[in-house]
C-alpha cells in the first residue's frame, strides 16, 4: 500500500509536469475519451485510426523516434497527440506540447524588450524537450525565418534521436524538402495516416454526379449492343472483354486501364461503374472530364478561387485512383499539354491506379502524354460497337445477360 505522502508527491509531480507541458485545457483529452476505431465513415479509415491509436499508446509508454500523424481536419489528430502527451505525463515522462504557429509567435516575441523569457531559453527548451509534441505543422506562414527555425528544431532532434510527435495539417508533399526528409526517414520516423485518402479540394470534383452513378453500373452495361443496330460477334466480344476488364480493375485497382472507342460505345459508362464500386468500398476517387479539369486548374489563379492551385494539382496527381474521361477533347495549348504531362508522368512513375477514356491513341512517339499509354503496364481495351445512344425507333432495350423478362 503506498503511503499517503507518496500519493501527494505523485499528484504534485503530475501537476508540475502538466504546467511544464503547456497542454492547458487539453489535459482533458485522453485515450479514454477517444474511440479506438475513430469516427471514419469507411472500414479502411477506421482500421487506420485503430492502428494510429495503438501506436500512439505504445509511443506514450516508450517514447522513441519520430511519430508523424497525418489526415484531414477533424479526423482526430490533435486529440490523439494530446492524449499521447497526457499519458506520458501520467507515467512520469516530461512532455512539451506546442502548436507551431504559437511556437513561432512566442519565438518572435522574445526579441521584444519587454519579453520575460530570453530567446535562447525558449528555443533550447523546445529543441531539447524530453518529449516534444508539435501540433499543426504546415499552417504557419512560410517565411524563410519560420522555415529556418523549424528546420533547426527538427534537425537537432533528428540528429539527437529525441522523441518527437508531429501533427501535420497539410500533405507531406507540401512541406519543405528538408523537413520532409527528416519526417519520412524510415530508420527513425513512422508516418501514420488517420483517414483513408485525401478529401477532394472541390465539391464538384472527385466523384461522378449521383445520376451517373445510378445509371452507369456494371449491372446495366449491355455487352450485346444497343439493340437498334446489328452487332457482330467480334463487336460483342470486344464489349464483353471491356466489361470483364473493368470489373477486375474495380475489384483490385492496379496499373492503368485505358478504354478506346468512338462516342457512345460505353467507355464513360464503364469508367463511372469503376468509380462507383471503389466509392462503395470507401476509397478516394478523382473522376474528372479532362477539359473541366484544366478549367478548374486555370481558375485557381483567380482571386475568387476557393482552393489553391498547388492543393488541387497535388491532389489530382496523387489521389489513389484517378479517372480521366475523354482525354484528347481538351484544347491543346502548351500550358494544357504541360499540366497533363506532369499528371500523367507522375502517376506513371509512381504506378498509381489510373483509368483513361479516349477516342483513340495518337500515333506520335514524340508526344509525352500519349507515349506513356503505350507502356506494357497499360491495359488498352478497344470498344468496337454501334453508338448505344443511337437506338432505332421502337427497338426493344437489351437485357443484361441472365436476366429474365418480368411476367
Image (tube, grey):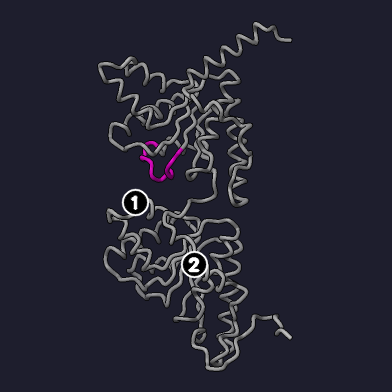
Residue highlighted by disc 2 = 209
Q: Residue 134's x, y, as percent?
A: 45, 30
State yes or no: residue 178 in magenta: yes
State yes or no: residue 81 in magenta: no
Tell me: residue 94, above or below residue 341: above
Q: Residue 364's x, y, as percent?
A: 34, 73
Q: Depth check: 162 or 306 in front?
A: 306
Give me the residue at 49% from left, 41% from top.
70
Secondary structure found at label 1:
loop
Q: Residue 374's x, y, as percent?
A: 44, 69
Tell me: residue 195, above or below residue 185: below
Along the horizontal axis of the image, is 253 left or right of 117?
right
Q: Please report the bounds of the magenta region as a residue range.
A: 168-179
Give me the residue at 35% from left, 53% from top.
306
Q: Depth check: 72 or 334 in front?
A: 72
Tell me: residue 145, above or below residue 169: above
Residue highlighted by disc 1 = 308
Along the horizontal axis of the image, is 188 left or right of 339?
right
Badge 2 density bin: few <14, some 14–19, many ≥20, Cα 10 Å: few
Give me the residue at 69% from left, 80% from top.
403
Residue 187 appears anywhere in the view: no
Badge 1 density bin: few <14, some 14–19, many ≥20, Cα 10 Å: some
Please tell me how many numbered marks the rendered image carries.
Answer: 2
Amino acid at each position: 500500500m503506498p503511503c499517503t505522502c507518496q500519493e501527494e508527491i505523485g499528484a504534485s509531480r503530475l501537476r508540475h509536469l502538466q504546467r511544464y507541458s503547456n497542454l492547458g485545457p487539453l489535459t482533458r483529452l485522453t485515450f479514454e475519451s477517444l474511440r479506438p476505431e475513430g469516427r471514419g465513415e469507411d472500414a479502411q479509415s477506421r482500421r487506420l485510426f485503430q492502428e494510429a491509436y495503438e501506436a500512439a499508446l505504445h509511443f506514450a509508454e516508450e517514447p522513441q523516434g519520430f511519430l508523424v500523424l497525418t489526415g484531414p481536419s477533424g479526423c482526430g489528430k490533435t486529440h490523439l497527440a494530446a492524449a499521447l502527451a497526457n499519458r506520458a505525463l501520467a507515467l512520469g515522462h516530461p512532455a512539451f506540447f506546442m502548436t507551431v504557429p504559437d511556437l513561432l509567435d512566442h519565438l518572435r516575441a522574445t526579441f521584444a524588450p519587454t519579453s520575460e523569457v530570453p530567446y535562447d531559453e525558449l528555443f533550447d527548451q523546445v529543441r531539447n524537450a524530453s518529449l516534444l509534441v508539435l501540433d499543426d505543422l504546415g499552417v504557419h506562414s512560410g517565411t524563410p525565418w519560420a522555415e529556418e527555425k523549424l528546420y533547426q528544431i527538427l534537425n537537432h532532434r533528428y540528429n539527437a534521436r529525441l522523441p518527437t510527435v508531429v501533427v501535420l495539417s497539410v500533405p507531406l508533399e507540401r512541406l519543405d524538402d528538408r523537413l520532409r526528409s527528416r519526417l519520412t526517414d524510415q530508420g527513425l520516423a513512422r508516418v501514420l495516416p488517420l483517414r483513408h485518402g485525401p478529401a477532394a479540394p472541390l465539391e464538384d470534383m472527385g466523384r461522378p454526379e449521383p445520376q451517373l452513378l445510378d445509371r452507369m453500373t456494371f449491372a446495366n452495361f449491355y455487352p450485346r449492343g444497343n439493340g437498334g443496330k446489328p452487332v457482330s460477334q467480334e463487336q460483342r466480344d470486344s464489349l464483353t472483354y471491356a466489361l470483364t476488364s473493368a470489373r477486375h480493375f474495380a475489384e483490385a485497382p492496379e496499373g492503368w486501364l485505358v478504354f478506346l472507342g468512338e462516342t457512345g460505345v460505353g467507355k464513360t459508362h464503364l469508367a463511372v461503374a469503376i468509380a462507383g464500386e471503389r466509392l462503395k468500398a470507401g476509397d478516394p476517387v478523382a473522376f474528372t472530364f479532362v477539359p473541366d479539369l484544366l478549367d478548374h486548374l486555370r481558375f485557381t489563379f483567380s482571386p475568387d478561387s476557393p482552393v489553391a492551385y498547388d492543393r488541387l494539382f497535388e491532389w489530382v496527381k496523387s489521389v489513389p485512383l484517378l479517372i480521366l474521361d475523354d482525354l484528347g477533347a481538351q484544347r491543346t495549348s502548351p500550358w494544357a499539354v504541360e499540366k497533363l504531362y506532369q499528371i500523367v508522368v507522375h502517376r506513371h512513375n509512381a504506378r498509381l491506379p489510373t483509368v483513361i477514356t479516349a477516342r483513340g491513341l495518337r500515333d506520335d512517339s514524340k508526344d509525352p502524354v500519349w507515349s506513356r499509354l503505350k507502356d506494357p503496364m497499360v491495359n488498352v481495351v478497344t470498344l468496337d460497337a454501334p453508338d448505344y445512344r443511337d437506338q432505332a425507333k421502337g427497338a426493344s432495350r437489351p437485357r443484361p445477360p441472365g436476366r429474365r423478362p418480368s411476367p
